[in-house]
Each structure stands twice: as structure tokens, then as C-alpha cells.
Amino acid sequence: MRKWMRTLTITGAAVAVSAIFLTTTTYGRSLQFVAGGALVNLGYRMQDHLTSYDFAAEHAHDITPEEIWEELVLQNAKAAGVRRKFPRTARHPLVALVACMDARIDTNELTGDTRKYYYVLRTAGSVLDDKEAEMLELCVENGVKLIVLTTHTECAAEATAANKELHARYPALVKAVFDRDLRVQQLLSRPAIAERIARGELAVKRMNIDTMTEELRPVGGEGQVGEQASDK
């Protein structure tokens, strides 16, 4: 009996010390983040090999629009049910991330972070229009301290702009890609943005995403404000 009590006491003390370590130290919190990311990645890998949208092996990609919609609604119902039972913590975003709409880019995997610290703005070719610039300014007004403007390798929008035979078919998209750097400069010149940058309250980085690995790589060397895209 005494041996059992001693074992229980030692086990309880070890659990308590581990809990304190995990919740109160920088290394412990970092360890939780890495472990959580590993579990999320495991979930991605479990789903990754399922090639048919509705899981029927005979369908593969031969599935009608209505069948896709029905499956989407079903998947949403399942996901929403889980979220009702296990609600997420609401956080105030610190980062505004602009990314292409390419399905190969997963913004959660860019940082390995599933927490809600990010405003995510996705457009074809990562291009900005007036409304996107205004949205980014609104994000800054609401407390964002970092804007990350990304492009990515193997971008279909950039490939379209580079192919003169497609210019007549997709004129708006081509113009948007060609004007991308100009739009970035216009964003940086907006008073609310420029003033915060000058005061050190806001940073703007331009990065290129490796589509295969989702690694962020600096554009033009350091990824600093106002650099010209190397893939133009």
C-alpha cells in the first residue's frame, strides 16, 4: 500500500511539474506548439491520399458540380459539429498575409501555425486592387503590425501574363500582374501605412513562396519594403 501511494505521489508530482513547465516556460510553450503542429500535419497526411472529393474510389475527378456541392455541405456539417464541441480561441490578428488563390498554397502550413493570428487575403496572382489596399489599411488600423506580401513559384497568373497569346483572353488578369509592383508602391504610400512604417509600428515584407515546400524566401535578397519582384 505504501509503495502504491509513493508511486502515485511521484507520478502526480511529475505530472504537475510537467504541466508547470509546459505552461509557464518559453521552451515548454514552444514544445506544445511544435507537438500540436506535428499532430495537425499528421491529420493533413491522413487526408492527403484521398483522391476523390466524395471519397468514392470510382469517382476520382469524374464528379458532377451538384455532387461536389452536396459533399461540401456534408463536410461543413461535420467540421462545424466538431467546432461546436471544441471551440477555438479567438485571437486578435497581428499579421496580414497576402497570398495567391492557388490551391497548393496552404496559409496555415506557411508558418505551421493554426492559431488565428492572421488576416489572410487571397487573390489571383497575389495582386492588389483598391479594395484590397483599403482592407490592408483597415487591418493595420485594427492592430496588425506586419504585412507579408507574397508571390509564389509556378504561378498560373504569372504564366498567363508571360504568354502573349493569352493576353487578349485574360486582359484584366494580365494587367493586374503587370501592375503588381505599382500597386505595392501605392499601398506603401498610403498615409496610414507610411506613417506607421516610419514610426517603427509596422513592417511590410515581400516574400516568394516555394510552391512545393511552402518555404518563404525573400524577394530581391532581404524581403524589405518596396523591393521589386525578382520573378517579373
Image (cartoon, helix red, strand yellow):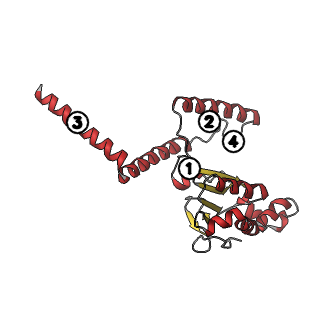
| Cα distance in 3D space between marks 2 and 4 | 10 Å
In three-dimensional space, the C-alpha distance between marks 3 and 1, rounded to whole angstroms, equals 36 Å
Point out which mark residue 11 bears.
Answer: 3
Circle nearer the N terminus (1, 4): 4
Indicate the secondary structure of the residue bearing disc 1. loop
Which secondary structure, mark 2? loop
Q: Residues within 10 Å of mark 3 (few under 14, many from 20)?
A: few
Judging by the rendered image, the residue that carries numbered circle 1 is 117
Which residue shows up at 51% across the image and 45% down it?
Answer: 45
Q: Determine whether, in the image, residue 170 is placed left or right of residue 80.
A: right
The circle drawn on residue 40 is none
Q: Can you identify the residue that label 2 sits on?
A: 57
Q: Are marks 2 and 4 in contact (CB under 8 Å)?
A: no
Q: Quadrant of the N terminus?
A: top left
Q: Nearer the viewer, mark 3 or mark 2?
A: 3
Seen from this angle, which residue lies furthest left?
2
User: Mark 3: which amino acid?
Assistant: Thr
